[in-house]
Image (cartoon, grey):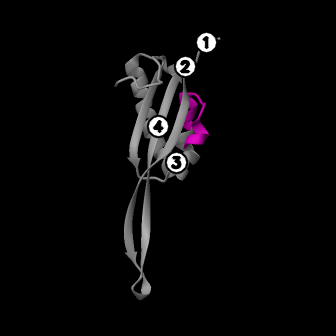
Amino acid sequence: MAVREGYGEKQAIAVLRYARISPLKARLVLRQIHGKSVGEALYILKVMPKKGARIAENLLKSAIANAEQKGLDLDRLYIKKAVADRGPMFRKWLPRAHGRATMLRKRLSHLTIVLEEREEE
């Protein structure tokens, strides 16, 4: 995994593009885990009854695996950044009464989770 601009050696990232969930719904879940330790965040996502929680849980596990590959200490990891950006929209037409049609918009998201080692004090 290449180091991206602005990400240091003590960080691991995971990106999910084109997730089939609206960014608004994904942000509701990601705000709950921002700044938390990795173990605490996994527990929160496990018990949260939302579709976005399942998606974010898999993405967080991927970020943890990336951190493990980089040799980071898993006990000191915390979620530095968790964002849901807007992706493209599927647009299709639904037939309605009297010969009309209504546009359906299926919104997609790009999710990003950045993990960082907490500095010891």
Q: Tell me which numbered mark, 4 or 1, is placed earlier along the sequence.
A: 4
Residues at badges 3 and 4 in contact (C-beta under 8 Å)? no
The residue sitting at the left extreme is: 1
Residue 103 percent across, percent down from the top left:
43, 70
What is the distance, in whole Å, between disc 2 and disc 4 at their CAs? Answer: 20 Å
Q: Label 3: state its secondary structure.
A: helix
Q: Residue at x 47, y 23 (%)?
A: 7
Q: Residue at x 51, y 50 (%)?
A: 23
Circle 4 residue: 112
Q: Which residues are the magenta region?
A: 30-43
Q: Relative to 58, does residue 109 appear above or below in the rendering?
A: below
What is the distance, in whole Å, between disc 2 and disc 1 at their CAs? Answer: 9 Å
Q: Tell me which numbered mark, 2 or 3, is placed earlier along the sequence.
A: 3
What is the distance, in whole Å, between disc 4 and disc 1 at their CAs? Answer: 25 Å
**Where is residue 110, by image quadrant?**
top left
Residue 82 versus residue 85: which sits nearer the camera? 85
Residue 44 percent across, percent down from the top left:
57, 39
The residue sitting at the right extreme is: 121
Circle 2 residue: 76
Q: Nearer the viewer, mark 2 or mark 3?
A: 3
Residue 19 percent across, percent down from the top left:
41, 48
Circle 3 residue: 26
Q: Nearer the viewer, mark 2 or mark 4?
A: 4
- The three-letter amino acid code for the residue at tag 2 is Arg
Circle 1 residue: 120
